[in-house]
């Protein structure tokens, strides 16, 4: 398991395992066996065991697990875009593309 401060340098597998270990600690604190926790989130015990030991699972299963443990409120802060001032938004705005004018070919004289 990695330290909290190392998420910026960690691999995705390391982060998943660390988060899984944190949720495992919460499960144990509640006194739930793996089979009970698996039943609560609607997966098999073997699927739950794999999720808890490797951190690999679907996003939906992770969310169900988090909700089951009463930690869903902590998900709200994830990936929240930062609020910018109007001046910041204007500074970051890319200029609108303009099409180049097309050269017109001379019209043939009608004789």
Image (tube, rainbow, N blue to C red):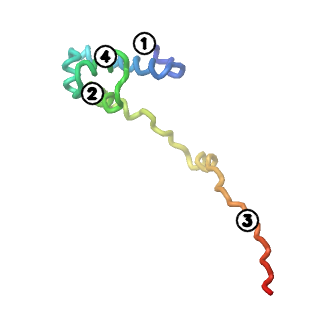
Left or right of 96 in this view: 25? left
Judge depth for marks 4 and 2 and give the one in front.
4
Answer few, some or many: residues within 10 Å of disc 1's Cα (few below 14, many 20 plus, some between 14 and 19): few
Direction bottom: furthest residue: 111
Residue 53 appears at what percent x and percent y?
A: 34, 15
Q: Name the residue under label 3.
A: 102
Left or right of 27 in this view: 14? right
Q: Mark 2 points at which residue?
A: 70
Q: Name the residue under label 4.
A: 24
Left or right of 4 in this view: 111? right
Which quadrant of the rendered structure holds the C terminus?
A: bottom right
For marks 2 and 1, give the CA distance.
22 Å
Q: Mark 1 points at which residue?
A: 1
Residue at 46% across / 18% down in the picture?
A: 4
**Circle 1 sits in a helix, a strand or a loop, which is it?**
loop
**Circle 4 sits in a helix, a strand or a loop, which is it?**
helix
- 50, 33: nearer the viewer: 50
Dot placed on the residue nearer the N-terminal end, 1 or 4: 1
- 72, 43: nearer the viewer: 43
For marks 4 and 3, give the CA distance.
65 Å
**Circle 3 sits in a helix, a strand or a loop, which is it?**
loop
Dot placed on the residue nearer the N-terminal end, 4 or 2: 4
Answer few, some or many: residues within 10 Å of disc 3's Cα (few below 14, many 20 plus, some between 14 and 19): few
**Circle 2 sits in a helix, a strand or a loop, which is it?**
loop
For marks 2 and 3, give the CA distance.
62 Å
Res 42 label: none
């Amino acid at each position: 398991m990695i330290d909290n401060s190392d998420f910026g340098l960690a691999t995705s597998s390391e982060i998943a395992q660390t988060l899984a270990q944190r949720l495992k600690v919460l499960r144990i604190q509640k006194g739930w066996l793996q089979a009970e926790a698996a039943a609560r989130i609607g997966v098999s015990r073997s699927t739950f065991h794999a999720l808890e030991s490797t951190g690999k699972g679907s996003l939906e299963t992770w969310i169900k697990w988090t909700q089951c443990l009463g930690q869903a409120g902590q998900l709200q802060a994830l990936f929240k875009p930062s609020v910018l001032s109007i001046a910041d938004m204007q500074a970051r705005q890319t200029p609108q593309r303009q099409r180049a004018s097309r050269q017109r070919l001379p019209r043939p004289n009608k004789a």
